[in-house]
């Protein structure tokens, strides 16, 4: 099951349950130069059990040294959003952040599975690529023919910055591919009509590496030369009507169109049936559509941070459906304390859902705020206790989560959050006031694309039977 991970000496893991520091080798993270052995299924279970004991890793509402995270369940059922911040990820100072938005009957399990496994795959592939590159430097060998055929063995000659970007690009591509492969072969998790988006980043020094699929989004808050607040979008919302995405889907015989009741939500449909109606062009899982244009290849980008960059915000589409990039940046910047910034964004999104779409059910919202300059501000003990008390409800429900446990998963029925024609007439003027969002980080071919603000209320409409 995703056997690209490696473990070291098991003896070094014994102290993890007693609160001692758990080594990276215990979590399935290989170390360059170490002789690795093939992982077994028992190793996989063991490493997942120790994952919750990993130092500086946060997956529930709260804060770390440099970040805060918060999620709130919508009104569609179980919260299918997941998030993670992992500080000192590869080395001291390196940070991994991710937001994952599940959909379908088992979407919440898929999102949590990706949250737990993808970071370990990413660092494993990065270390493997780095080791391979170091050996190549010593022997002056060209990349292997296999890597060149996959399009992942790109030439990494040039500056140190180019080398680092190429190594991370290769690691993102391989880890996302391996993650999707593991979901497909999972013995207990049915991902035929379930899946998850992902927006992930690694901050290593002044370098920011971002990979994403689906419509979760990352933005950067900065100050310009006149000391004004600026929002820069780091990812593109990969929706089915994005021109290059629609072209690929149609070439694979998939269909893209929106329902009459929700003309602002383009969906992907099978060529022979009006199902499943997926509202994104790339995702983990959703194997009923993988032969018809839906892929799990991430969009990768590299950005060198400056002193003017203040923070990065990652969030699921429940936030971006109702708040613009500029609004989110302003909310985070104006937060009374940094540790409350993520929660303030979610609270603002909840209010906007009620105002802009009163007849629609609010979507789940998950937010990660990573502050680039300085650490989290100190707060009084009473304020921390009050904040933790309000977050306790979300944590209780999540502590018993298991990626292999589907006993409590709901069966998928048509979600009646799509507005009827009568409801559409009642609030027809509301959607026209929806804020347009910029796309500074978009490529030249997408500069004129204005579909980033599309509202998605149900990510997948119907459940399909498993085809033989």
Image (cartoon, grey):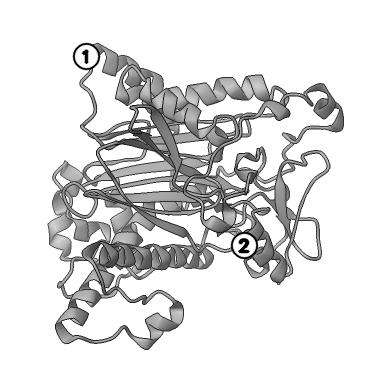
From the top left corner, tell me how far across and down residue 176 is, in percent.
44, 62
Q: Quadrant of the C terminus?
A: bottom right
Q: Is residue 381 above or below residue 450?
A: above
Q: Is residue 289 visible?
A: yes
In the rendering, which numbered label is found on residue 380? 1
From the top left corner, tell me how far across and down residue 160 is, in percent.
22, 65
Q: Is residue 248 above or below residue 20?
A: below
Residue annotated with mark 2 = 294
- Name the residue located 29 percent from the left edge and 73 percent from the top edge: 156
Q: Is residue 17 above or below residue 33?
A: above
Q: Residue furthest top?
A: 382
Question: Mark 1 and mark 2: span between their CA atoms?
Answer: 48 Å
- Name the residue located 29 percent from the left edge and 45 percent from the top edge: 305
Q: Quadrant of the N terminus?
A: bottom left
From the top left corner, tell me how far across and down residue 233 is, in percent.
46, 43
Q: Is 215 positioned to the left or the right of 354 in the image? A: left
Q: Is 186 positioned to the left or the right of 416 in the image? A: left
Q: Is 172 positioned to the left or the right of 162 in the image? A: right
Where, by quadrant of the figure, is residue 165 drawn? bottom left
- Name the residue located 71 percent from the left edge and 44 percent from the top edge: 265
Q: Sequence-wise, which precedes: disc 1 or disc 2? A: 2
Q: Is residue 184 above or below residue 347?
A: below
The local secondary structure at tag 2 comes to loop
Where, by quadrant of the figure, is residue 97 drawn? top left
The front one of 323 and 310 is 310
The local secondary structure at tag 1 comes to loop
């Amino acid at each position: 099951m995703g056997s690209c991970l490696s473990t070291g000496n098991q003896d070094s893991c014994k102290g993890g349950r007693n609160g001692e520091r758990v080594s990276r080798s215990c979590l399935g993270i290989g170390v360059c130069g170490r002789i690795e052995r093939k992982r077994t299924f028992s190793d996989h279970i063991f490493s997942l059990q120790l994952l919750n004991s990993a130092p500086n890793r946060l997956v529930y509402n709260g804060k770390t040294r440099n970040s805060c995270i918060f999620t709130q369940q919508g009104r569609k059922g179980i919260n299918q959003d997941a998030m993670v911040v992992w500080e000192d990820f590869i080395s001291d100072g390196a940070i991994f952040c991710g937001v994952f938005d599940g959909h379908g009957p088992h979407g919440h399990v898929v999102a949590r599975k990706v949250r737990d496994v993808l970071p370990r795959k990413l660092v494993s592939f990065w270390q493997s690529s780095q080791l391979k590159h170091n050996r190549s430097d010593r022997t002056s060998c060209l990349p292997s023919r296999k890597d060149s055929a996959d399009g992942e063995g790109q030439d990494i000659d040039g500056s140190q910055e180019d080398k680092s970007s190429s190594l991370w690009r290769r690691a993102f591509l391989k880890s996302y591919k391996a993650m999707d492969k593991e979901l497909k072969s999972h013995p207990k998790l049915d991902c035929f009509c379930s899946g998850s988006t992902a927006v992930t980043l690694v901050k290593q020094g002044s370098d920011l590496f971002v990979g994403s699929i689906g419509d979760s989004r990352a933005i950067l808050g900065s100050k310009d030369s006149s000391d004004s607040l600026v929002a820069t979008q780091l990812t593109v919302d990969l929706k089915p009507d994005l021109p290059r995405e629609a072209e690929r889907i149609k070439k694979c015989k998939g269909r893209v169109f929106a329902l009459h009741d929700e003309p602002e939500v383009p969906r992907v449909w099978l060529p022979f049936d009006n199902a499943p109606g997926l509202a994104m062009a790339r995702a983990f899982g959703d194997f009923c559509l993988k032969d018809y244009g839906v892929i799990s290849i991430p969009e990768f980008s590299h950005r060198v941070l400056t002193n003017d960059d203040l923070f990065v915000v990652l969030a699921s589409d429940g936030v971006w459906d109702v708040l613009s990039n500029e609004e989110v940046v302003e909310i985070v910047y104006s937060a009374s304390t940094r540790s409350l910034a993520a929660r303030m964004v979610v609270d603002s999104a909840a209010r906007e859902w009620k105002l802009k779409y009163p007849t629609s059910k609010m979507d789940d919202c998950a937010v990660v705020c990573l502050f680039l300059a300085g650490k989290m501000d100190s707060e009084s003990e009473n304020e921390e206790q009050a904040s933790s008390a309000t977050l306790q409800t979300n944590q209780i429900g999540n502590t018993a989560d298991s990626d292999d446990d589907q006993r409590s998963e709901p069966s998928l029925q048509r979600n009646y959050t799509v507005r009827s024609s009568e409801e559409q007439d009642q609030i027809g003027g509301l959607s026209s006031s929806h804020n347009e969002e910029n796309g500074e980080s978009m490529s030249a071919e997408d500069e004129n694309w204005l579909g980033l603000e599309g509202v998605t209320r149900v990510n997948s409409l119907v459940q399909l039977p498993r085809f033989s």
